[in-house]
């Protein structure tokens, strides 16, 4: 510091005093909006021009927040300078939140407050694979699987039209046949991922033709009477899964009149569950 006078050259100058300039001037806006997907970050920066002051930066909500600020201390009550401040928004899940950044002198005097808002958009996902077949039999019990690029493993299965298929978790069984079944696979999403779905259409659900495993026994008839007067009893049929199929037997040609002796005539099995067989 150099003092000069225009008079009294060579004489002492007494009673001179000075003070250091003190200032803190942030270039920050009054508010910032930040956006990032979960697991990603967004940042905003501003500068603080300061001199002969120490500043403290803090967030109103410091716990469980996706916001952070760096550095948190500026200046040292000494030389002037300019510091760059960075606000970071790093959400871990989808949603939104607000916070407030305070810039205060070390004495507690507030210099500026900045309103912060953050929005975390959920990540889009898609189903990349499944094991749905193009056709099934009504007797099938199918365990369905699917994959999503999010690596999430929970899926919900539904079928259309109603009343054809039903689900127990990912296990699909059938109530009746159908030639245009559609199966929709949905991944419901979570705090980070949006839900997604895909539909497999034109699936055929075929009726199963039972196999007669035991022929029925024909009752005696009177000579000259039609075959339908012979009562059929017993007999059995099974499906492709070796399940016994309920039903009844009838003569193929019910009006035939057998001649005397023993003869062989065709019988037909009619299943009770005609939606399946």
Image (spheres, rainbow, N blue to C red):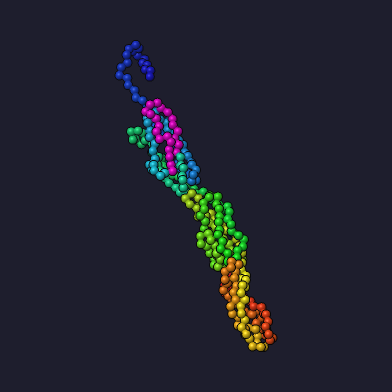
Where residue 157 sits: x, y (%)?
Answer: 53, 59
Can you say which quadrant of the picture contains the C terminus? bottom right
Left-right relation of 35 to 20: right
**Residue 246 falls inside the magenta stretch:** no
Where residue 90 sits: x, y (%)?
Answer: 46, 42
Q: Nearer the viewer, residue 6 or 275?
A: 275
Left-right relation of 221 to 77: right
Residue 210 appears in which quarter of the rendering?
bottom right
Judge whether 194 appears above or below 50 on screen.
below
Q: Nearer the viewer, residue 217 or 244?
A: 217
Where residue 100 sits: x, y (%)?
Answer: 40, 42
Left-right relation of 246 to 74: right
Can residue 178 be seen here? The reply is: no
Residue that sits furthest to the bottom in the current view: 223
Left-right relation of 4 to 95: left
Residue 203 appears in which quarter of the rendering?
bottom right
Residue that sits furthest to the right in the current view: 259
Judge whether 120 appears above or below 143 on screen.
above
* Picture residue at 30% right of the left edge, 17% below the top: 14
Judge whether 101 appears above or below 121 on screen.
above
Residue that sits furthest to the left in the current view: 15
Start-end of magenta stretch? 66-87
* Picture residue at 60% right of the left edge, 76% below the top: 235
**Residue 76 falls inside the magenta stretch:** yes
Q: Nearer the viewer, residue 171 or 247?
A: 247
* Picture residue at 53% right of the left edge, 50% below the top: 151
* Picture residue at 62% right of the left edge, 71% below the top: 211
Residue 225 appears in which quarter of the rendering?
bottom right
């Amino acid at each position: 510091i150099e003092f000069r006078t225009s008079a009294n050259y060579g004489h002492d100058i007494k009673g001179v005093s000075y003070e250091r300039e003190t200032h803190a001037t942030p270039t920050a806006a009054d508010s910032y909006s930040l956006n990032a997907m979960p697991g990603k970050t967004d940042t905003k920066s501003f500068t603080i021009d300061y001199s002969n002051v120490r500043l403290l930066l803090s967030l109103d909500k410091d716990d469980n927040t996706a916001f952070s600020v760096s550095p948190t201390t500026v200046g040292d009550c000494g030389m002037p300078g300019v510091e760059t401040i960075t606000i970071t928004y790093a959400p871990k899940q989808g949603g939104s939140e607000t916070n407030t950044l305070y810039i205060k002198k070390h004495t507690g005097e507030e210099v500026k407050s900045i309103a912060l808002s953050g929005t975390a958009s959920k990540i889009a996902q898609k189903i990349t694979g499944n094991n749905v077949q193009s056709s099934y039999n009504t007797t099938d019990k199918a365990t369905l699987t699917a994959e999503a690029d999010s690596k999430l493993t929970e899926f919900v299965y539904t079928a259309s039209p109603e009343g054809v298929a039903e689900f127990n978790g990912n296990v699909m069984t059938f109530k009746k046949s159908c030639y245009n079944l559609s199966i929709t696979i949905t991944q419901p999403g979570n705090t980070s991922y949006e839900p997604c779905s895909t539909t497999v259409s034109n699936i055929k659900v075929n009726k199963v033709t039972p196999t007669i495993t035991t022929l029925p026994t024909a009752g005696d008839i009177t000579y000259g009477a039609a075959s339908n007067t012979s009562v059929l009893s017993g007999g059995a049929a099974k499906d492709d899964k070796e399940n016994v199929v309920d039903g009844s037997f009838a003569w193929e040609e019910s009006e035939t009149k057998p001649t005397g002796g023993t003869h062989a005539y065709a019988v037909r099995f009619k299943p009770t569950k005609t939606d399946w067989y």
